[in-house]
Amino acid sequence: QVQLVESGGGLAQPGGSLRLSCAASETIFSINTAGWYRQAPEKERELVATITSGSRKNYADFVKGRFTISIDNAEDTVYLQMHNLKPEDTAVYYCNALITTIGGLRRDYWGQGTQVTVSS
């Protein structure tokens, strides 16, 4: 059973940077599309960024110019590079990916979430 394993969250100061990683737990055939979402306390989960296998990217307005989503197909890993972090970026960040497994199954997976806290 493929899992998405997230890492890279933590505490950052306002204006700082973090890079989140989301790696498939076993070898897969391909990542078709992927996205990062976040959920702050007492708020709905919201879309942060998405990317297709053709590298078409889409960003929420509140992260444009600050965050970059990317896929490393050799490592089966999705990244979210975050710069100029703001306190309002504080949330649990979740990755999501539509994956084709080695066996040819196409399924949607979610990571377990990683906490990002932006505070001085």
Image (cartoon, grey):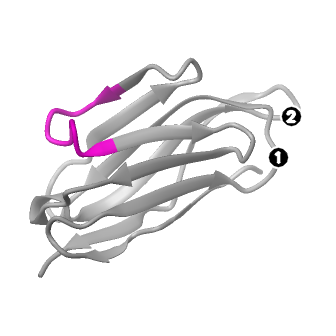
**Name of the residue lying farthest toward the bottom:** 120
Mark 1 neighbour class, 10 Å CA radius: few under 14, some 14 to 19, many 20 or more: few
First in residue order: circle 2 vs circle 1: 1
Above or below 58: residue 22: below
Q: Nearer the viewer, residue 57 or 15?
A: 15
Q: Are marks 2 and 1 in contact (CB under 8 Å)?
A: yes
Give the image quarter of residue 92: bottom left
Residue at 19% in and 57% down? 84
Give the image quarter of residue 35: top left
* Residue named by callout 1: 27
Above or below 60: residue 94: below
Residue at 35% in and 70% down? 115
Q: Amino acid at mark 2?
A: Ile
Q: Position of residue 79 (x, y in %)?
A: 50, 48
* Residue named by callout 2: 102
Q: CA distance from mark 2 to mark 1?
A: 7 Å
**In the rendered structure, which segment of residues is drawn in magenta?**
58-67
SS type, badge 2: loop
Left or right: where does residue 107 sit relative to residue 63?
right
Q: Amino acid at mark 1?
A: Thr
Q: Position of residue 48 (x, y in %)?
A: 29, 41
Q: Position of residue 4 (x, y in %)?
A: 61, 53
Above or below 12: residue 103: above
SS type, badge 1: loop
Mark 2 neighbour class, 10 Å CA radius: few under 14, some 14 to 19, many 20 or more: few
